[in-house]
Image (cartoon, rainbow, N blue to C red):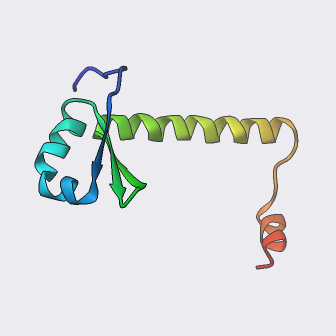
Amino acid sequence: MKKPNTAHASNTVTATKAKASFSAVLTQAGYQGQRIIVKKGRRPTAVILGYEDFQRLVDLEDRYESALLTKSLKDDRFLTLDDVTRRLGL
């Protein structure tokens, strides 16, 4: 496993350029630790990042959701499935 790169560089490319040089974009994201922002027109539309960065984001998301659940249980703010379906009108 590659050592995590904590200083992530970002690079912005157009969708057309990303398509034309997709292999290079994958190399930048996957092996060089860059996060590639893809713009369509003037708007940023997507980000290409390496798999290890993605896994770290998933891990952070899981930790955050676990912390929210723990806090909800501690504060006795847990909803039953019946409460959720009633609130959603299902």
Residue nearest the observer in this picture, 79 or 7: 7
Q: Quadrant of the C terminus?
A: bottom right
Between 62 and 10, the one lying in front of the other is 10
| Left or right of residue 18: residue 82 | right
The residue positioned 54% from the left and 40% from the top of the image is 61
Residue at the limit of the structure toward the bottom, as seen here: 90
Height in image: 32 above or below 11? above
Q: Quadrant of residue 49?
A: top left
In terms of depth relative to the viewer, which is nearer, 85 or 10? 10
Task: Count how many numbered circles sit on residues in the image.
Answer: 0
Q: Quadrant of the N terminus?
A: top left
Q: Residue at x 21, y 53 (%)?
A: 18
Q: Position of residue 67 (x, y in %)?
A: 67, 34
Q: Quadrant of residue 45?
A: bottom left
Please state which of residues 51 and 81 is positioned toward the viewer in this rendering.
51
Q: Position of residue 53 (x, y in %)?
A: 36, 35
Quick one: which residue is furthest to the front in this view?
Answer: 42
Horizontal and vertical percent position of residue 72: 79, 41
Would you say 62 lies left or right of 45 here? Answer: right
Q: Is residue 62 left or right of residue 5?
A: right
**Figure quadrant of residue 12:** top left
Q: Position of residue 55 (x, y in %)?
A: 38, 38
Identify the residue at image location x=27%, y=30%: 33
